[in-house]
Amino acid sequence: MRQLLQISSAVLLFSASALMPAQAVWQAGAWKVFETTALGTASNALYDYIKQSWDADKIAQWQQDITQLGAQLVDYEAAMPQTDSAMASHAEHEVTRLKQTLADTHTLLQAMQARLGEVEPRVDNLESELAQIKTHIEAFASQHPQEAQSAGVKVPEPALQFDINYVYRAGGKGELKPLNEGEVLRSGDHYKLVFTPKQNAFVYVFQRDSANKLFQLFPMQQMGGVVLNHHNPVEAGKTYTIPAVDKSFYLDQQTGTETLYFIATPEQDKALEAQYQALQTAKDAPSIQVAAARFEQTMRTRGMAGIIDDPQATAKHSVQGDDGQSFAVLVDEFFGQCDTAQGCLQVRTFEHR
């Protein structure tokens, strides 16, 4: 079907260009066939990226398709109507949007190729491209459902998304600051995590401390005698603070690397829960080592998710310190390309010195 659509779009384009005025190329429906073909290619690449299902042959075919579509798009751009101002404006908008989608898909294919070569790209550099491709595909599918269905345009399932902030206070006093990747904290510093899910989901948060011990931070009923009542599933639009609105974690005298693991899944992850329980009940060193390795492997099977700036640059969380003082902190957005079965993993590491 994909090859047939590509051939038909090319025939329509060049025959229409030869026999009709430039405006008629757009009116005759040639553009719609071409747009459907291009979005079908982009959606297939995005869909398989999300599903972690691609190989070198697929990437090579997509790259060839994108190159050919880009060349055809140049011809469409040359044939844009010039006399009808309303039509010209519409045509320019459509060409620009599709040109961006093809460019974003090319970037995605490069990242997929890099992964095949065991060169892991920074996922957060792809987030804006992934979001734009997905938005364009969804808009087209909703406006032209029959064309999308006949072309095999795949609309990716909604990715799990969160507004999220890691924050800390030096010595437990003063202003709350972003706890960025690789940040250096000192003994006595306080830190917490605040997140708001955009969909109902299940969340699991773990920390591997500087002594290489693993702790579950969410869900959690209580900690140190403090009742927290953090439980799954989390609700869309509700803000959660770990450990609590008026509480923070603090760093003791054991220095080293601290790692936070934020896992989001659409459904309850019973395997992860069982493996964490097995790790907690392991008694001897060999059993602990085996259980820890299995748990780490299970976590790492989740798709890696990135942190990007919230599209609304002025969006802020009001985060409260232990003393009740509130601070406005710029929101980051956790954009997870989540497989419905595996979920997403986001890792935040900082140094305790």
Image (cartoon, rainbow, N blue to C red):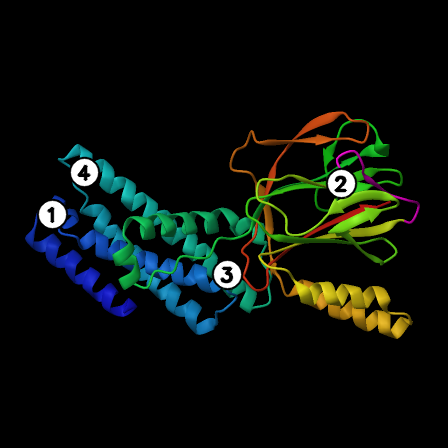
- Is label 4 in contact with label 3 (beta carbons under 8 Å)? no
| Nearer the observer, 157 or 277 | 277
Marks 3/2: CA distance?
Answer: 30 Å
Is label 2 in a helix, a strand or a loop? strand
Above or below — where is 170 with respect to 26? Answer: above
Disc 4, SS: helix
Q: Amino acid at mark 2?
A: Lys
- Magenta range is 242-254
Q: Dot 1 corresponds to which residue?
A: 24
Q: Which residue is mark 2?
A: 192
Disc 4 residue type?
Met
Q: Is residue 329 magenta?
A: no
Horizontal side, residue 247 vs residue 136: left or right: right
Q: Is residue 24 visible?
A: yes
| Magenta stretch: helix, strand or loop mostly | loop
Q: Which amino acid, by three-letter code, is at mark 1? A: Ala
Q: Which of pointers 4 and 2 lies earlier in the amino acid sequence?
A: 4
Q: Residue at x 49, y 46 (%)?
A: 128
Seen in the picture, residue 77 relative to 297 is either above or below; the reply is above
